[in-house]
Image (tube, rainbow, N blue to C red):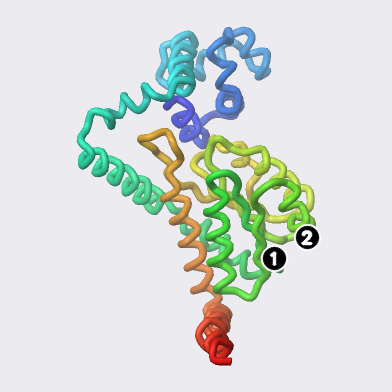
Amino acid sequence: MIIDKIASSMKTFSPTNKKIGKYVINNKQDIGFASVLSLSRKIQVSKASVVRFAQALGFPGFNQFKEAIQEELKKQLNPYPNILFSDLDTLSKEKQLKKLVANEIANLNKTLDNLDIHVLNEMVEQMDKAEKIFISGFGGSGPVAKKFSHSMRIITDQRIESITGALSDFAPVLSSLRENDIVFILTLPPYSQEVFFVAEYVKKNKGILYLLTDSEACPLYDIADWILLCQNNSLALVNSYVGITALHQIITDMYLLYSKDQGIRSVKAIRKIEHTDYLQLKKE
């Protein structure tokens, strides 16, 4: 995928290529119908810079780059050929299952292999200092965010808030955000409008933004304070949540180890309610 290649190359690009790359990632629908001149004017770079950008990605020139973008857009607009391309529909049910399982194992392995331990440790240390921790997710990421919130509430006395659903649902929660509070945003493409609103509110009110997403192509990548990436390859044109689920589990476990005494107290208090107070209530 060209967009993925651009995103993975951003760190090595020159400032001009980064500028062009960001525009392409966020406006790929326009690229397939643009000329070198119109594109250079929109991005405010020279025509030669646009051509060199295409060549940096391995294309002879801009026209070949544009044609490749057009092909990607065609596949996205008509997704069934993508399924045919993966050959899943031609395989037996057993082979389909094996291929899908192998893909999810690969997603998990790549997510864990690329895990930045320094970033993870910094995130956990800041979490321990925060008064409140907010965990947000929308669409398919919503249930994952709720599970993350539930796991965190088990191991800490800190205030853990979930931000999901419609604006009217989470606005009262988000309004309690204060400076240096931490907000997790879990998001995979297509990125919902709610994540942009939450991210802008966090930065405006001097919160700390943690991002769990699939690539540097995420529009929130440049404004997040700390980022962990997950692998999100899919053979059936739906997001894979294996990687992002693994990330929130590892964060939870690392935080428990970091604040072990607090975690043990919290877990014991919950177990007392579940196994002692509840049993006593049943007897009465």
* Residue located at (49% from left, 13% from top): 66
In the rendered view of the protein, which quadrant contains the N terminus? top left
Q: Is residue 74 above or below residue 95?
A: above
Query: Is residue 35 in view from this perspective?
Result: yes
Disc 1 marks a residue whose amino acid type is: Lys
CB contact under 8 Å: marks 2 and 1: yes
Badge 2 local density, few (<14 within 10 Å), some, or many (20+)? few
> Whole-Å distance between the Cαs marked 2 and 1?
9 Å
Indicate the quadrant where residue 39 lies.
top right
Q: Secondary structure at mark 2?
A: loop
Q: Secondary structure at mark 1?
A: strand
At which x and y percent is residue 221? Answer: 59, 41
Q: Is residue 269 above or below residue 250?
A: below
Q: Earlier in the sequence, mark 2 or mark 1?
A: 1
At which x and y percent is residue 8? Answer: 46, 35
* Residue located at (44% from left, 37% from top): 238
Indicate the quadrant where residue 75 lies.
top left
Residue extending furthest toward the front: 284
**Closest to the observer: 245 or 39?**
245
Badge 1 local density, few (<14 within 10 Å), some, or many (20+)? some
**Closest to the observer: 79 or 65?**
79
Location of mark 1 (residue): 132
Number of numbered discs visible in the structure rendering: 2
* Residue located at (38% from left, 35% from top): 236
Horizontal side, residue 64 vs residue 22: left or right? left
At which x and y percent is residue 178? Answer: 78, 60
Q: Which mark is residue 166?
A: none
In the rendered view of the protein, which quadrant contains the C terminus? bottom right
Q: Is residue 56 above or below residue 166?
A: above
Disc 2 marks a residue whose amino acid type is: Ser
Location of mark 2 (residue): 176
